[in-house]
């Protein structure tokens, strides 16, 4: 069973994470839970940097909370076209 799910909405340009060492916050990190896009996916191994810094998983610079990842992207509002109303 995979930890990745389509219910976590993360844009395709955002890198996904596969920690090389343990990570204490991966269960609530969107980079670890989001599905890998079919093309142009970038992966990071954030656990390595955290391990070198002393193994403090709470200090990962790539941590992205699930709540922030699921926020919808803001759509640009176009002005109304004259004569269509």
Image (cartoon, helix red, strand yellow):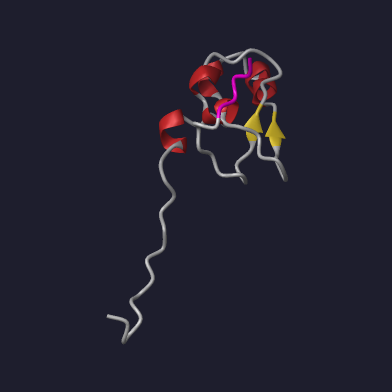
| Magenta range | 1-5
Q: Is residue 65 left or right of residue 40?
A: left
Q: Nearer the viewer, residue 62 or 30?
A: 30
Look at 69% across and 26% down and name the residue there: 45
Q: Is residue 11 left or right of residue 76?
A: right
**Residue 74 horizontal/vertical position (percent):** 41, 54
Q: Pick out the residue farthest to the left.
A: 85
Q: Point out the residue furthest to the front here.
A: 85
Q: Position of residue 32 (x, y in %)?
A: 59, 26
Residue 76, relative to residue 2: is it above or below? below
| Vertical side of 61 occupied by 83: above or below | below
28, above or below 39, in the image: above
Q: Nearer the viewer, residue 44 or 49?
A: 44
Residue 36 colored magenta?
A: no
11 above or below 60?
Answer: below
Would you identify the image quadrant in which residue 21 lies?
Answer: top right
The secondary structure that dominates the magenta segment is loop
Which residue is found at the position 50% from the left and 38% from the top?
Answer: 9
Of residues 57 and 68, the one nearer the viewer is: 68
- Residue 53 occupies quadrant: top right
For the C terminus, the quadrant is bottom left
Q: Residue at x 70, y 21 (%)?
A: 48
Quarter of the image that includes the N terminus? top right
């Amino acid at each position: 069973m995979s930890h990745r799910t389509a219910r976590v909405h993360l844009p395709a340009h955002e890198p996904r994470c596969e920690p090389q060492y343990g990570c204490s916050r991966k269960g609530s990190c969107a980079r670890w839970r989001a599905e890998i896009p079919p093309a142009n996916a970038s992966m990071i191994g954030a656990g390595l940097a955290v391990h070198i810094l002393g193994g403090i998983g709470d200090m990962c610079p790539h941590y992205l909370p699930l709540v922030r990842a699921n926020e919808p992207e803001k759509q640009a509002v176009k002005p109304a076209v004259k004569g269509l109303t």
